[in-house]
Amino acid sequence: MENNQNQNELSIELTEEVAEGIYSNLAIITHSNTEFVIDFVRVMPGVPKAKVKSRIVLTPEHAKRLLGALQDNVIRFDAIAAGNQTADAEVIGGDPTVAFPFGGTTGQA
């Protein structure tokens, strides 16, 4: 039984470069009969051209799983953020335009 548990575990490595993330404020989604393609783009004010920063290709099954996971997380986010303009962010110096997401400046593991 314990052997089966170890076989079902997946170790996921996150490199420093990937951990930094890529900011995107636009997603363009297209699909064919066999796959979904999500292009993540960063659009900047006053710049007439934008480049795709990342492209993710998914099977229809995985696209449906992603949709469900996103929907679940948005529902949980909305429940926490209801009535709180800065959501779960810490406001710095009383200025609501400056906020640190994920609980502020204190690092947690």
Image (cartoon, grey):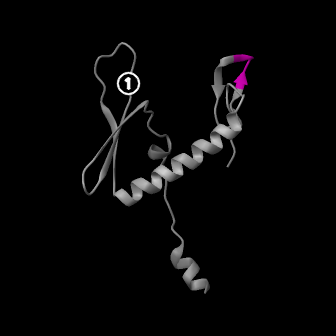
Q: Is residue 99 magenta?
A: no
Q: Nearer the viewer, residue 13 or 57?
A: 57
Q: Residues within 10 Å of mark 1 (few under 14, many from 20)?
A: some
Under mark 1, the amino acid is Val
Magenta stretch, residue numbers: 91-95
Q: Is residue 69 above or below residue 52?
A: below
The location of residue 31, given as percent across then percent down, is 28, 48
- Which residue appears at 51% of the width and 78% of the height? 7
Q: Is residue 6 above or below residue 73?
A: below
- Which residue appears at 44% of the width and 37% of the height? 22
The location of residue 81, given as percent across then percent down, is 68, 34
Q: Nearer the viewer, residue 70 or 54?
A: 70
Count the numbered circles shown: 1
The location of residue 6, given as percent across then percent down, is 56, 78
Q: Nearer the viewer, residue 64 or 101?
A: 64
Residue 9 as seen in the image, left or right of residue 100: left
Q: Is residue 93 magenta?
A: yes
Q: Quadrant of the N terminus?
A: bottom right
- Which residue appears at 65% of the width and 25% of the height? 99
Residue that mark 1 sits on: 43
Q: Residue furthest bottom?
A: 1
